[in-house]
Image: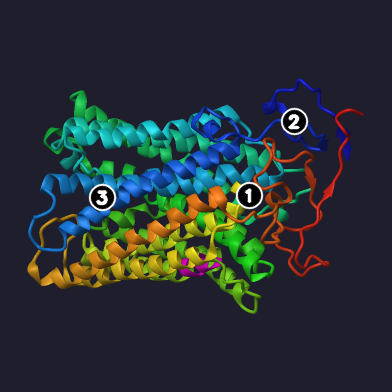
Amino acid sequence: MTQVELPRNTPPEDNHNKPGIQVAARHAHIPPWKWYDYFTFNVDHKVIGIQYLVTAFVFYLIGGLMALAMRAELMTPDSDVLDPNLYNAFLTNHGTIMIFLWIVPSAIGGFGNYLVPLMVGARDMAFPKLNAVAFWLNPPAGALLLGSFYFGGAQSGWTSYPPLSLVTANTAQTMWILAIVLVGTSSILGSLNFVVTILKMKIPSMRWDQLPLFCWAILATSVLALLSTPVLAAGLVLLLFDLNFGTSFFKPDAGGNVVIYQHLFWFYSHPAVYLMILPIFGIMSEVIPVHARKPIFGYKAIAYSSLAICLVGLFVWVHHMFTSGTPGWMRMFFTISTLIVAVPTGVKIFGWVATLWGGKIRFTSAMLFAMGLLSMFVMGGLSGVTMGTAPFDMHVHDTYYVVAHFHYVLFGGSVFGIYSGIYHWFPKMTGRMLNESWGRVHFVLTLIGTNLTFLPMHELGLQGMPRRVAMYDPQFITLNQICTYGSIILGLSVIPFTINILWSWIAGQKAGDNPWNAMTLEWTTTSPPAVENWEVLPVLTHGPYDYGKNGHNAVLETGETAIPANS
């Protein structure tokens, strides 16, 4: 392999590994980042990853408080806590914040930015400045959403279907649209960066069948975002024109077509489910082998299933519209495609369970949340299969059965996965270990709270309780009270997690460079990593999951060569 020494004045963004070149150590004297650097326009992918994670968690707390307020309102059938208009605004912005400012930014922006360059052996993302711009589009988007409450708040649900969105809180609805366009632009910029980084910047010694499964998941997610996000942006811009400039794209009384908006919205917003869950699948594929001390079962099947979900996921959106005058042939086609998309997901579940089978499982907090995700996501997936069939979906459409389904998938799936990833990579990000006892308390409260909150909603939906309403028939009061008690436990579960994070970050046990004895490249550098990740770029000598193979039982081995900077 050719070796070269870069000039001392080479700018950081030019110091990326090129095919066939081993880059020498450089800038070893650069001091680590200070705490205030995380509040600046910083181009280091690790800083940006933590900026995404912390900002997203703040919005998670805000969205969670909105959910608790709504559940307090639903303790009784009458409107006695929130004004109906305020309830609608909370409902709209809770869903918007949790999807666009919590799950997507933390799963893709947070973990993706922090880990992808480390996992492929790069010193940074392909376009560092563009990466920073992508993050800094998110805080203004959040400010627009929260600022919209001054004007009454957007009140038409996170789907913002016209004509309802055209007649309620015009200014607030406009701010909502602008916020989503900003977040969508951030997603497009970030996705472009991920695709180029993975395809062009992995170290030459890494074959494609040695690429970590998290990177496969991020690659599939990024392609999906690049294909679907512009469609949502187009629909929202047309809605913005209807609101403010007198056009009539979606005004039925002026010849507009509201169903076209639904097609534009769901062409993005069902793939958005995979934008939220595919990175979490990648996290699962990294956490489970490490803590089970076994090679991942079916590496190629899991990798290719991510690409299959990316492809098939573009052809399932109409199952959200079975009650929107959809013709019979279209219902049949999208019923079949919806059932097909469950197959690659099942491949992943089977691979993870087979990896656990016979493994030397360490029940760390990361592993507990990963195993909790398996049970939660399987339950959400099964209810999703039922709703993918048109006859059943038409029966439970817009009932609490739908609410139960997507919360099991997105909270029981995505949020459990985010927690698992934080417990797994926190030592790498901070150099400190999280407290495992507090982690177990956090897991137990989250597991109980999730099931107590969302499991009864299946029965509420089957009995016919509509969603998105503040007042309901008194026959539903008992199940709603159980859901509210569960939401309180779920809210309390965040307290030990937050205390654990803050205390451990300041004074937690020192972690060392590789506390889990993992085998992917991010564990070959210091904890936390140096500014440019490695003094010397590693050379891969084994696969990322080769536990027990070729003598790699516990400790990661790397080959490192470089020309000293002063030679």
- Viewer-nearest of labels 1 and 3? 1
Q: Residue at x 26, y 70 (%)?
A: 458
**Element on which disc 1 rests:** loop
**Residue that mark 2 sits on:** 29
Q: Residue at x 75, y 51 (%)?
A: 207
Q: Which quadrant of the structure image shows residue 474?
A: bottom left
Amino acid tagged 2 = His
**Element on which disc 2 rests:** loop
Task: Check the image and report above or below for 204 versus 486.
Answer: above
Q: Residue 66 has which mark?
A: 3
Residue 269, image x, y percentages = 36, 48
Residue 323 is one of the magenta-drawn residues: no
Segment tinted magenta in the rendering: 367-373
47 or 499, which lies in front? 499
**Residue that mark 1 sits on:** 431
Magenta-colored segment: predominant secondary structure: helix
Kindly report the distance in space between the C-alpha atoms of the residues bearing marks 1 and 3. 34 Å
* Left or right for 70, reference 549: left
Residue 402, image x, y percentages = 28, 62
Q: Is residue 509 visible?
A: yes
